[in-house]
Image (tube, rainbow, N blue to C red):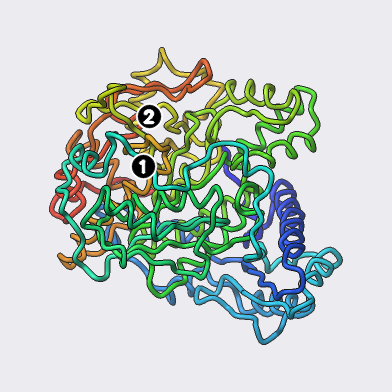
């Protein structure tokens, strides 16, 4: 059965498990802040303090109302002041948190409350950043505070930068998988480009994430001559530098700007500190980002998130089973933190607060897309290796025994994008798609399946019954992912921004018609595919998520956990998402 994650700092009373999660989050945040401070020397530092939000059940109910076709409130998105009134912290909590910061030594004049009234930011005077850590160790964190995150710091690549997958810093060579050929495969006119000045799309990542303007110009020259590179801009002063996430940023930027052709594109890096690049500092940076973005006066209609790792639940499962195999928790955690983007989230409670940020983004009208992972249903990218003695082999055995979902893509509040390629090794045939060998997919251990998924998932489980992994290895009632797929010969970090860019052109079309953006579009997407099969997405029936393991989920006609509903078909997307004429029937709303 599905297991819900704890909400740390929630208004309701916390269970013992929630208390443990919050305590763990506090200890890890202290370590992260201390690490961030240590590389800053005597420079001023900034901390982000997440306040306890209110009325979260009402927020989730609102999320489903504005996301469900046929409901009276469908696509009636909310403003920042309206959401501040709904979830913003109480005046008492704000006052308590402000005093806590002052007691910790921040510059009182630097404390600022976010427009959503759920975050405080503050700066320390130069030479005093460590005082906050000392005060926290003595006084602890008040109930009014959900989390705190250090922001920025000089980036220094850790040893783990050499472990795991890498993406080329130089402009990649795509072979047969050119922008032109992919667009032809999906039926997208090669010269179709945005015309509405309000259309806006975004990619995000921390650490070294960014893009090279010269590489983008080279990409334009070779693959996308109509691309107006002046429409691609940074939204912070962090522009990236050579490192693992820099390769991700270049790929994300090229793909979303080519497929969302001439939509204004924001490349965002909101935290450059060392801990965000490889390990669990990433979860802190993502939490900071998805908490801050909904409070902006202008938000993108489309956001693509390529980065992620195993979910907190999957990492806890690895550790629990690893301890049964005779290894200490300390040794397992130390090994996992040395791996490239394997366990980057602190706790299920942290994940829950990230999900709240995703709900707020959807209610603001943002469609969030994310990569489904590159390790099938067992790994984040690939089997474990590297220096760790017998631990890597033991963790590989555990990973093959269970299906290991990632995060954030399998969140119930965003769209998960898997990967495809084309049949034919020497001459790939765009008319014959198949699942990319690493396409991530499966079922969440932590989140129950929303009601719009249940009929099609049940049909899949029945069709594939004889070929499924052992029933004990996955949660058949969990959120199923991915939702759809696109070309991923460079990983699902390629497919997510491709799909995001395509939907940006849909948003541009809608804006030109005077229609609102689509926000969280999964209920509409699943209903369209059930009622008009094959029109908006072409089913991909070849593939399996087993990778190097002996079990996995097989592809089947219709929805499956390998490529979701399949790859895009432009004419069907425009028909069913570009207007409201074909709005599907109301489905039961999940609250």
Foreground pick, 529 / 565: 565
Q: Position of residue 196 (x, y in %)?
A: 21, 68
Q: Position of residue 545 (x, y in %)?
A: 44, 25
Give the SS element for disc 1. Answer: helix
Disc 1 + disc 2, Cβ < 8 Å: yes
Residue at image x 75%, y 80%?
102
Real-space CA distance between mark 1 and mark 2, rounded to the nearest whole angstrom: 10 Å
Mark 2 Cα shell of 10 Å, populated few (<14), some (14-19), many (≥20): many
Number of marks in picture? 2
Q: Which residue is mark 1?
A: 495
Return the disc, 1 or 2, that comes first in the chain's sequence.
2
Mark 1 Cα shell of 10 Å, populated few (<14), some (14-19), many (≥20): many
Residue 1 in sight in this render: no
Q: Which residue is mark 2?
A: 436
Give the SS element for disc 2. Answer: loop
In the displayed structure image, the side of residue 582 where residue 405 appears, left or right: right
Foreground pick, 169 / 509: 169
Residue 365 in sight in this render: yes
Residue at image x 39%, y 47%?
171
Q: Is residue 551 above or below residue 439?
A: above
Q: Position of residue 396 (x, y in %)?
A: 63, 24
Residue at image x 62%, y 59%?
10
Residue at image x 41%, y 26%?
437
Q: Which quadrant does the N terminus fall into?
A: top right
In the displayed structure image, the side of residue 49 where residue 461 appears, left or right: left
* Displayed quadrant of residue 47: bottom right
């Amino acid at each position: 059965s599905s297991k819900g994650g704890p909400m740390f700092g929630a208004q309701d009373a916390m269970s013992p498990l929630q208390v443990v999660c919050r305590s763990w989050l506090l200890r890890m945040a202290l370590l992260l802040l201390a690490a961030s401070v240590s590389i800053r020397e005597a420079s001023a530092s900034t901390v982000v303090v997440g306040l306890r939000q209110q009325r979260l059940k009402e927020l989730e109910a609102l999320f489903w109302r504005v996301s469900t076709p046929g409901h009276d409130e469908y696509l009636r998105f909310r403003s920042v002041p309206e959401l501040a009134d709904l979830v913003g912290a109480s005046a008492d909590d704000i006052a308590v948190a402000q005093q806590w910061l002052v007691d910790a030594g921040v510059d009182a004049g630097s404390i600022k409350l976010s427009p959503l009234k759920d975050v405080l930011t503050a700066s320390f005077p130069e030479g005093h950043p460590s005082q906050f850590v000392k005060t926290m160790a003595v006084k602890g964190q008040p109930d009014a505070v959900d989390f705190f995150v250090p922001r920025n710091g000089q980036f220094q690549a850790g040893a783990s930068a050499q472990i795991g997958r890498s993406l080329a810093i130089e402009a990649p060579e795509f072979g047969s998988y050119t922008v032109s050929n992919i667009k032809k495969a999906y039926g997208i006119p090669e010269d179709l480009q945005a015309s509405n000045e309000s259309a806006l799309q975004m990619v995000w990542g921390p650490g070294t994430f960014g893009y090279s303007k010269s590489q983008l110009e080279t990409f334009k020259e070779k693959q996308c001559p109509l691309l107006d590179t002046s429409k691609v801009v940074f939204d912070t002063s962090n522009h990236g530098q050579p490192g693992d996430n820099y390769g991700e940023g270049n790929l994300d930027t090229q793909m979303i700007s080519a497929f969302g052709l001439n939509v204004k594109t924001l490349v965002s890096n909101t935290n450059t500190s060392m801990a965000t690049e490889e390990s669990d500092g990433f979860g802190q940076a993502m939490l900071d980002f998805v908490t801050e973005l909904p409070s902006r006066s202008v938000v993108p209609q489309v956001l693509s998130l390529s980065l992620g790792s195993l979910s907190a639940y999957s990492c806890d499962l690895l550790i629990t089973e690893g301890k049964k195999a005779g290894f200490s928790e300390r040794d397992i955690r130390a090994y996992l933190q040395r791996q490239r983007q394997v366990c980057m989230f602190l706790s299920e409670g942290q994940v829950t607060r990230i999900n709240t940020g995703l709900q707020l983004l959807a209610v603001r009208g943002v469609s969030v897309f994310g990569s489904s992972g590159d390790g099938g249903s067992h790994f984040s990218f690939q089997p474990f290796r590297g220096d760790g003695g017998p631990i890597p082999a033991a963790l590989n055995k555990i990973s093959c025994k269970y299906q290991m979902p990632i995060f954030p893509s399998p969140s119930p509040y965003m769209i998960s994008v898997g990967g495809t390629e084309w049949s034919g090794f020497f001459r790939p045939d765009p008319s014959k798609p198949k699942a990319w060998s690493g396409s991530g997919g499966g079922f969440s251990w932590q989140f129950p399946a929303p009601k719009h998924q249940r009929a099609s998932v049940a049909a899949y489980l029945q069709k594939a019954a004889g070929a499924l992994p052992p029933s004990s290895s996955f949660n058949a009632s969990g959120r199923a992912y991915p939702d759809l797929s696109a070309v991923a010969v460079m990983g699902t970090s390629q497919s997510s921004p491709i799909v995001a860019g395509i939907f940006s052109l849909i948003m541009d079309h809608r804006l030109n018609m005077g229609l609102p953006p689509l926000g969280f579009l999964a209920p509409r997407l699943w209903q369209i595919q059930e009622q008009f099969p094959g029109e908006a997405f072409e089913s991909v029936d070849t593939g399996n998520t087993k990778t190097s393991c002996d079990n996995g989920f097989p592809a089947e006609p219709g929805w499956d956990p390998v490529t979701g509903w399949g790859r895009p078909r432009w004419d069907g997307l425009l028909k069913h998402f570009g207007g409201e004429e074909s709005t599907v029937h109301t489905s039961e709303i999940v609250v």
